[in-house]
Image (cartoon, grey):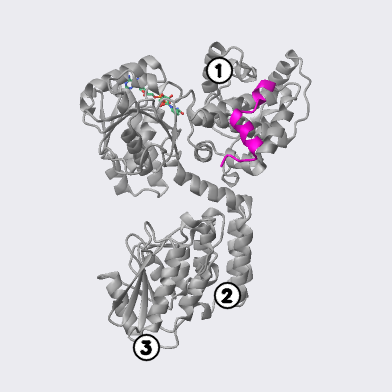
Amino acid sequence: MSASYELHGPVAVITLNNPPVNGLGHASRLAVAEGLERAQADANVKAIVITGAGKAFSGGADIKEFGTPKALAEPNLLSLIRLVELCSKPVVAAVHSVCMGGGLELSLGCHYRVAAPGANVALPEVKIGLLPGAGGTQRLPRVLGVETALNMIVSGDPVKSEVLASLPGQKLFDKLITDGDLLQGAITFATEIADKRPLPLVRDMKVTHPNADGYFQFARNTVGAMAKNFPAPLKCVDAVEAAVKKKFDDGMTYEREQFVALMMTPECKALRHAFFAERAASKIADVPEDTPLREIKKVAIIGAGTMGGGIAMNFLSTGTPVTLLEMKPEALERGVATIRKNYEAQVKKGKLKPEKYEATIALLSTTLSYDAIGDADLVIEAVFEDMEVKKAVFQQLDKVMKPGAILATNTSTLDVNQIAAFTQRPQDVIGTHFFSPANVMKLLEVVRGEKTAKDVLATVMAVGKKIKKTCVVSGVCDGFIGNRMIEQYSRQAGFLLEEGCTPAQVDKAVEKFGFAMGPFRMGDLAGNDVGWYIRKRRYVEKPDLRYSKTADLLCEMGRFGQKTGAGWYDYKEGKRDAIPSPVVEKMIADHRQAMGITPRQISDDEIVHRLVFALVNEAARLLEEGIAQRASDVDMVYLTGYGFPLHRGGPMCYADTYGLYNVAQAMKRFAQNPNDDAAFWQPAPLLAKLVEEGKSFN
Ligand code: NAI
């Protein structure tokens, strides 16, 4: 049932019923239209209430129908809103819980709106690269004033119903029903206004601004500076300006045209891709969604270093008690001091209330003894990256943890299956690969071992969601999804230096493409010694694999990055500004000469595509090997963990948009570069197959 119809005396109540958030799918729209018709035909009905069952009034468009013909099938949302407006009997929207996008637009077509406090009211279309397309940009300014409406439309962020209802002069809500049942309140309200005529319509309301030109110019400057790379926010400003300057119907036409135009932009495509990719990532092919979860009420963390402290904060901040275990009291003190310092910084910035800070920190306990953590439901190990140390820790955990506890490792390079084999319960062992700083970064790679039980996997995915991470499942391999790909990207970055680029040239090209940071600035931030350590291992494991030696030479000079005051760039004391270094440039030039390479000019386009397609080709291998479940998971890893530009949708989405045939052609060209590595550009079989079949990754 997508909407129900009931009579409450002289009031007909149409209740949207399309879980989880009463999306306005075709069946729901049809059911509302039928309800309106039925109510109008019934002489006993004097007024109509539209509301939503369960957890929402309406969350807007039904995402299941996105991009399908059903989304536009009549009555489409615009037609439905028109039907509401033309209804001869008053229609009252009874808003609660969630009133977003098309849901809010539908309510704005109603003659009256009543609301329960606590409802999240928003027009979030901008977050997927669009503007509200069913009159939101024209009607919301009429009821909330230009400035409040524009802020909501440009940010897409929700505002609570009681906040909106308290704004002076607002006409969004006719009544806030603070006591008793919302539906009962709405029915009473509808009965009271049933005979009032003419019926008020938002489209007939006036919308003005005392200094419209000045205000919209100011809005454009502000929004333009913030919305770099995304066209939608500025279009929102244009559409709201149209609400002020054009007649209502002309404003609607303008809004529609802009909506359709935005829909076609690559930025909108990328944002929609990311939106669906995030949802897809939580699904695991062979783990049913209704898999019973293990209860996680208490967490223990082994190691209070860089990662352990950050991981602990995720749990503390979401209300789960944490016990931190260390080897020495000094290490515990240091770890706890860092956690406190991070929270105190949030308090100083006004992001955390002092009483909340106290309550949060009260959830933290510390210990030097394994006896104190045996009853934890989940234990996450974040000790030194050394198999012998991990072995000792997991053998100890196996002894003390209660049956059914989940044993997780935060290792970034070691074999999770081997770690699981140190215990008698490999089914309970899993990898949780957090990214640094773990309290900030969104990405969590959930590493599924050969023997990891399905309910352990499902539980960790749910826990990850609870601590507000984007969880992506990875199989076991060296580097998992993200770091295995980044190694190929770094190798290419090294080759680019050998062939003629400077670190600054590479970084600039990559940052112009939209990455938060180029590879060399990134190396200086993360520490160049990390990669050095990995390469040293590779030289033994895979002696034939080619790496540029420039990064090793840099490390041999002690230039590990910001932490040593010098890396690929120079740094002034206490500052983070990267200053091109003549010493490094000479080192690169000398190395080039020693290798007999004549430098050449390399275009920004070549730089970017060599780096991005290095990622794509490795990802194709990860897909083939089943390490990554789907191409969109790879995109989520790169969008949330590696600063890949959101407006490009992730490396796989970018490759699809660029065209896989064109990707393969570019790789062929790179393979012919005199000093590049031809073997490197051998297309992964999956990529070659997709090109042959004319298909794409996503
Ligand atoms: P860290 O060196 O900052 O902290 C390790 C902590 O573990 C130290 O405080 C140490 O005293 C403690 N420790 C060592 N052995 C112990 C034992 N047997 N029992 C109890 N405590 C012990 O290291 P970090 O950076 O926090 O790394 C921890 C783990 O996280 C490693 O496996 C690392 O590969 C992984 N990782 C690190 C990332 C990073 O960016 N630092 C990112 C993702 C994963």
- Would residue 417 be counted in the magenta stretch? no
Res 218 visible? no
- Label 2: how many Cα within 10 Å (few below 14, some 14–19, many 20+): few
Q: Which residue is mark 1?
A: 535
Q: Quadrant of residue 517?
A: top right
Vertical relation: 152 (above or below) 336: below
Q: CA distance from mark 3 to mark 1?
A: 80 Å
Tell us which disc is closer to us: 2 or 3. 3
Q: Secondary structure at mark 3?
A: loop
The amino acid pointed to by label 2 is Pro
- Would residue 679 be counted in the magenta stretch? yes
Q: Which residue is mark 3?
A: 195
Q: Quadrant of the N terminus?
A: bottom left
Q: Secondary structure at mark 1?
A: helix
Do the residues under discs 3 and 1 have CB atoms within 8 angstroms?
A: no
Q: Which residue is mark 2?
A: 210
The amino acid pointed to by label 3 is Asp
Image spot of residue 20 (x, y percent): 37, 56
Query: Foreground: 698 or 103?
Result: 698
Do the residues under discs 1 and 2 have CB atoms within 8 angstroms?
A: no
